Image: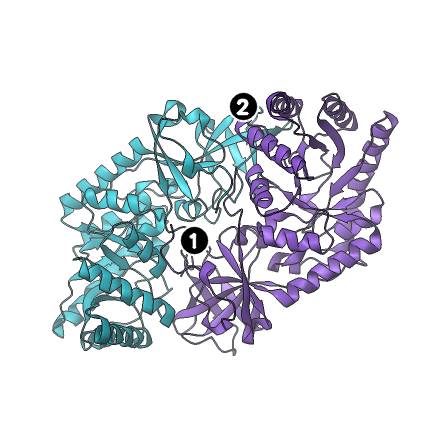
Chain colours: A cyan, B purple
Amino acid sequence: MRTYTGVLDVPAGLPVSELDTPTLVIDLDAMERNVEQMAAFAAAHGVLWRPHAKMHKCAALARHLIEAGASGCCVQKVAEAQAMAAGGVTDIYISNEVLAHSKLKRLVALAAQLHASGGRLAVAADSVLAVEALAGHVRQHEQYQGPAPVDVLVEFNIGQNRAGVQTASEVLMLAQTVSDVPSLRFAGLHAYHGGAQHIESAVERHAVMQQAYAKVHEVVQVLRAHGLDVVTVTGAGTGTFALEAASGLYTELQPGSFLLMDAHYACVQPAAQQPVFEQALFVKTQVVSRATHHAVVDAGHKSHAIDSGLPMVWNGGAQVQYGFGNGGDEHGLITALAGAELPALGDVLWLVPGHCDPTINLHDAMVGLRGGLLHGVVERVFQVDARGALW
Amino acid sequence: MRTYTGVLDVPAGLPVSELDTPTLVIDLDAMERNVEQMAAFAAAHGVLWRPHAKMHKCAALARHLIEAGASGCCVQKVAEAQAMAAGGVTDIYISNEVLAHSKLKRLVALAAQLHASGGRLAVAADSVLAVEALAGHVRQHEQYQGPAPVDVLVEFNIGQNRAGVQTASEVLMLAQTVSDVPSLRFAGLHAYHGGAQHIESAVERHAVMQQAYAKVHEVVQVLRAHGLDVVTVTGAGTGTFALEAASGLYTELQPGSFLLMDAHYACVQPAAQQPVFEQALFVKTQVVSRATHHAVVDAGHKSHAIDSGLPMVWNGGAQVQYGFGNGGDEHGLITALAGAELPALGDVLWLVPGHCDPTINLHDAMVGLRGGLLHGVVERVFQVDARGALW
């Protein structure tokens, strides 16, 4: 349907200088080093890793991670799961509550499809209402259309105070409800602390997570004491995964952002023994207007998300900054510290987005560059398959 | 390419209760009253109106506005112009600087196409470099492929301090540069103050704009004194258009948000004699998790932009609020004031986005409802044609 030249059409071999602006670009060399680091970390710590595809929303990248050793992918929405499955991913975990019948119908059809091809679908739950609605859809599907087994993980609030049940006895009750339903399997615990991921101080982050692990430990004990098999304890993000790995409680890590990184995570002090990841995601932008004390680039907050802060200028040193002010949806204002030179009309700047997940969700495609930002060439284009997949 | 059930597939006649969440919805009754009000206002004040399509990015809505009397549409990007032209809009103004050769090539091809069908393309400029680059592309096109006339409006900074030239003599110099190029027509002045649109106090906003109009008045005098025909003076947004209309200086108004409105514009006190517009854009969302003191809905900032503040809960009175906290990309946290009832698991809420433009840019489609949010039915689906059209 699209009539304009989008980056989906960019041919392999194109020099980076020819890429239109603003375009979302992946430095493939840096990304691949990040993948190697995470694979080595997971192997060394004997944990599974299931990177979160809510970040990249791209089936080709999910498959790339699985080829490097990941056990599958996480998603947040049924529609994201459908997009990943259509792109060849067969082991998918919807790490979020699903309640509406329209969604459960799609979820169960997908579970049947993955099961038939030797794969697996899992989903989180924090209410009896959701488990019973899911059970009803699975029952109906299995009566007429064959097996549609679904793994269910009970979401437990370990301090984020968003979704999740609050106490060990609630987890137990919900786990037993799941276990009583044929074709639902109680698969374990979802214990993720989103709020802790961006605590900048490693010491402070460690202290917060120790409280969380004490809760997880208690719940696992209670479940096992009642004869429930806790196969999976899953959680962690790019800010805390080394702590979950060291806790001895988690069997699976979910970080997503490590793959490409962003300006917000660059401010988070790594935990001890945690690999340091490289920035691999950039917005190429151009100066389209110049005033005496500022330059205007063609990337505003329709090109990069600003929920976690403004982008950083990668090729500006500390002297050139992206400011907010009157930039807005389609423009960015660039200022320079006293004595530093402002970029000229026509100059190219490379921005590091504040937050990778919602930035990628603004783009239909990401351009994979080989050989660096300055002299690289296009190797391939990654379609953002689940862009806008909100349902 | 999409494999999940998207709202593009929603059939006409579907009751609102059946719409999946989160979905972006237009209350068509409210929208059409907004259009009638703006058409009547423009007619009464003898000015053209050219609503900004950067807001809705939808060719069907641009055509709807033109059928109601609008003179065409504004856009910010060449790719947006291409999308509007593909959808049948023939009079398009790119109210922004265009500098890159890749963009100018598309721009000139579009100008030729619109010219051939009796339409017209215009673009803003604030540098000699951009005008000369445009002239080169027009010259090259006309030499081999026939006429591609482009109207050029000189962008003048009236206080926003983003793009635009700073002084009357710079405007004059640039206007003369344009006039010297065959097939470029100096069409007038772009004089928009984005920063003034959201000044909440009508008195304060009026004072800021009076200074801006004094500058516009001076520039128009200088241009006319030098024999230049200032056919168009264009600018204004939903916050200030009544002032531009009353100034006697502007021939054309560009407001876009009036069509659907948002929570941010709801806080802006209308100027005297300005129509009051109704909220017509909503995100339908559902409660998917409940804790003692909050509910979690399935709309986070991948469903609505938060650059201008969080959404308002339309059906919550003043008692129920959308908070940020740990909501994030895919979740929203709903709290209630003391004594008020929190929505229950499964309840539907209607959110008013903080900022309509970047919210629509997150969605592939908007669902047009007839008969209100509570009992309405789907009348039609509007594709967001220029979603992600950044180039």
Q: Residue furthest right?
A: B225
Identity of the amino acid at label 1?
Gly
Identify whether B225 is placed above or below B190. above
**Total number of numbered discs in the rendering:** 2
Residue A124, can we see it?
Answer: no
Identity of the amino acid at label 2?
Ala
* Residue at 16% across, 55% down: A248
Residue A388's mark? 1
Nearest the eye: A83 or A322: A83
The chain carrying label 2 is: A
| Label 1 secondary element | loop
Q: Which residue is mark 2?
A: A340
Between disc 1 and disc 2, whose residue precedes?
Answer: 2
Nearest the eye: B364 or B161: B364
Classed neighbour count for the residue bearing mark 2: other residues with Cα under 10 Å, few (<14), some (14–19), many (≥20): few
| Label 2 secondary element | loop
Residue A343, can we see it?
Answer: yes
In the drawing, does residue A72 fall left or right of residue A344? left
